Amino acid sequence: MFELILIAFAPALVLLYIFYKRDKARPEPRNIVIKIFLVGGIFVSILAGLLEKVLLNIFFNNPDLLNYNFSSFAQDLKMGAIPGFVEEILKFVTILIFAYKIREFDEKADGIIYALCVGMGFAAIENFFYVFWGLKASVFGSFFIAFLRALTAVPFHAILAVIMGYFIGQAKFSQDKRKLFFFLALFLPILLHTFYDALIFYFQKENLITLILELIIIIFAIIGIIFTLRLTKETVSDDTRIIYTRRIKTIGTLLNLIQRRKNFNQVVWRGESNTQSQGQEKNNFQNKI
């Protein structure tokens, strides 16, 4: 059981650690990162499982997703929309409830980190259930599922989380475009997630095509991770630049205040010196008289 938990959680934890280390200037507190990771995993997984089961029962009479063959891509798309909408909306709401308003969320890049906490927490729990399901076939089947999902589904959840977190971070520090950024933070992950699942359902009918699709997904996952890492780095760099600009302005303001104080003291000192000189001259004049 320990080995299953390890291979299920490892890909998500590794990806979260890689992105977390990108924020070198002002990293988020580890206790908050761990808390939101666990909340994202437990809260989103439980609710997503319940809601998807209800919706699948309503629209498809509760099909077996792993062995169900649809007659058209439109049905595949409809099926893919259920986890796409449910999971991404729940991730979005979880970020807003548990991360968006906390004091530590003070940079645009923090949106990416907290979205990854939620996304990777969910991916880890979901991965565990898939790996555990693989045991029904064999131990090898379980490890194969873990290996395949480590190269496809888990990186894909990370890509979706970065996209969502990027726009949530933009929304938090924007006034005129906040609604647009919130819309993009929700719409783009839902759209990508829906098409991803729809393609999986569509191509799983032929083993050879499925293998080719998995290879294509792995390639795109690698490209996506590289892109999102660069996006995270650029966002962190922008935040760092803003921080240092503020610090420079603050230092400049302090130096300006110090210089003004110094000038003021010099003026006061000169005024006192002039007053003393005038008093001394007056006394000398009176003595002469």
Image (cartoon, rainbow, N blue to C red):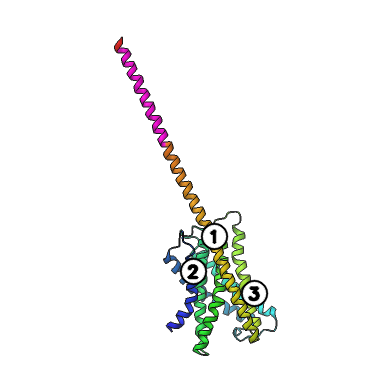
Residue 142 in percent (x, y) is at: 51, 85
Residue 26 in percent (x, y) is at: 45, 59
Residue wearing tag 1: 235
Residue 31 in percent (x, y) is at: 41, 66
In the image, is residue 269 part of the stretch drawn in magenta?
Answer: yes
Which element is circle 1 on? Answer: helix
Q: Which mark is residue 18?
A: 2
In the rendered view, would you say 28 is above or below 57?
above
Q: Main secondary structure of the magenta part?
A: helix
Please state the extent of the stretch shown in magenta in the rendering.
261-286
Under mark 1, the amino acid is Thr
In the rendered view, would you say 114 is above or below 72?
above
The span from disc 1 to disc 3 (Cα, nearest Å) is 27 Å
Residue 71 in view of the camera: yes
Q: Do the residues bearing badges 1 and 3 touch, measured as CB atoms within 8 Å?
A: no
| Sooner in the amino-acid sequence: mark 1 or mark 2 | 2
Q: Residue at x 47, y 48 (%)?
A: 248
Q: Residue at x 50, y 74 (%)?
A: 12
Under mark 2, the amino acid is Ile
Rate crowding at label 1 as few (under 14), some (14 to 19) or many (20 or more) other CA atoms within 10 Å.
many
In the rendered view, would you say 35 is above or below 143?
above
| Sooner in the amino-acid sequence: mark 1 or mark 3 | 3
